[in-house]
Image (cartoon, rainbow, N blue to C red):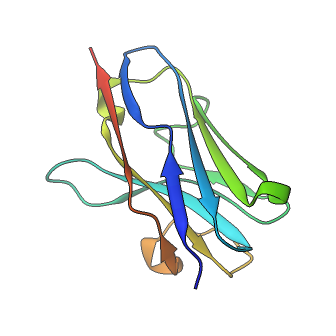
Amino acid sequence: QVQLVESGGGLVQAGGSLRLSCAASGRTFTTGWFRQAPGKEREFVAAINWSGGNTRYADSVKGRFTISRDNAKNTVYLQMNSLKPEDTAVYYCAATNSVNPSSAPSGYTYWGQGTQITVSS
């Protein structure tokens, strides 16, 4: 059983930046970030495989968000720049032993508790 703990959430003005961290209690092959706004379904944000050589992004965050990982620390990061009010949501870290990054929540086995990101206009 792998436990995931997110950190780095908070309140930021539009155009600002935040970096989220996802610390895992063990090794995971693929890690993704998802988000869920009130009244909406959970949606894919970004994912990265073990080596970091394969990444995927939602169209809505391409060019603004960057996912990366430090395997020595079992930690995955999500650098978020040029934040917009529509990025406001609870952000979840998820992990799987699959080698290919998936954009579907069903592709992930382990989930963190979530961290709130609020972008003010």
Spot the residue most to the bottom: 1
**27 on left or right of 77:** right
Asked if residue 53 shows in the view, the reply is no
Asked if residue 26 shows in the view, the reply is yes
Whether 7 is drawn above or below 83: the answer is below
**26 on left or right of 17:** right
Quadrant for the C terminus, please: top left
Please tell me in which quadrant of the rendered image residue 86 appears: top left
Residue in the picture at 52% in, 78% down: 107
Please state the horizontal and vertical placement of residue 104, each as a whole percent of the image.
47, 71
Spot the residue most to the front: 25
**100 on left or right of 8:** right
Quadrant for the N terminus, please: bottom right
Residue in the picture at 70% in, 55% down: 75
Whether 60 is drawn above or below 110: the answer is above
Please tell me in which quadrant of the rendered image residue 80 appears: top right
Please tell me in which quadrant of the rendered image residue 67 appears: top right
Q: How many marks?
A: 0
Please state the horizontal and vertical placement of residue 9, each as a whole percent of the image.
43, 37
Residue in the picture at 75% in, 64% down: 49
